[in-house]
Image (cartoon, rainbow, N blue to C red):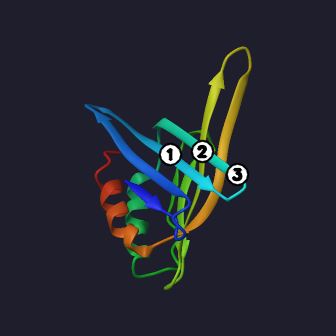
Amino acid sequence: MKIHSIDKKSWFAVKPLQDGSYTAISVEVQIDIGHGVFNAKNIDMHFQNLAVFTSDLDNFLTDRSILPRLNGSYDSFIEISGSVSHVFIKFSIGDVDCGAKTHQYNLCGSFEIDQKYLAPFIKVIKNIKS
């Protein structure tokens, strides 16, 4: 599922990857700020609190004081916030490269999204086996 920013210049994509007992999530983001474009993708992301995030996300639809946050490996997270009229997705997409020395990489950011993406996003998250 791809979630576009209000200005349609940036997007965030989530895709469940499930094979038997193995569950992961592919997460990709592209941020276009006009004078620069930033991309990140992790095709094997693992998150720790899917059940809590799903519940908080459901409740966020009617109570915008809730701050649903999905925490993942490599300091990654997906967070939804907002008010009645504005919704934001905040994220950190990370990964590591282990060679002679371990290097960690993260792309962090946020942007405003159209509220129409909330219900389909909840459906995608609910279909991920924890």
Q: Amino acid at mark 2?
A: Asn
Which tag is nearer the camera, tag 2 or tag 1?
2
Q: Report the Cα–Cα distance between label 2 and label 1.
A: 8 Å
> Residue 55: horizontal and vertical position, in percent?
38, 65
Which residue lies under the disc numbered 3? Answer: 36
Q: Residues within 10 Å of mark 1 (few under 14, many from 20)?
A: some
Residue at 47% in and 46% down: 48
**Residue extending farthest front:** 35
Task: Check contact, mark 2 vs mark 1: CB within 8 A.
Answer: yes
Q: Dot 3: within a 10 Å radius of its alpha carbon, few (fewer than 14), some, or many (20 or more) residues?
A: few
| Element on which disc 2 rests | strand
Instruction: Give the residue type at disc 1.
Output: Glu
* x and y, in percent, of residue 98 in the image: 65, 21
Q: Residue at x 30, y 60 (%)?
A: 123
Q: Residue 104 location, x and y as percent?
A: 69, 33
Asked if disc 3 and disc 2 are in contact, CB closer than 8 Å, the reply is no
Which residue is found at the position 43% from the left and 74% from the top? Answer: 115
The residue drawn where x is 50% and y is 45% is: 28
Q: Label 1: which residue?
A: 28
- Type of the residue with mark 3: Gly
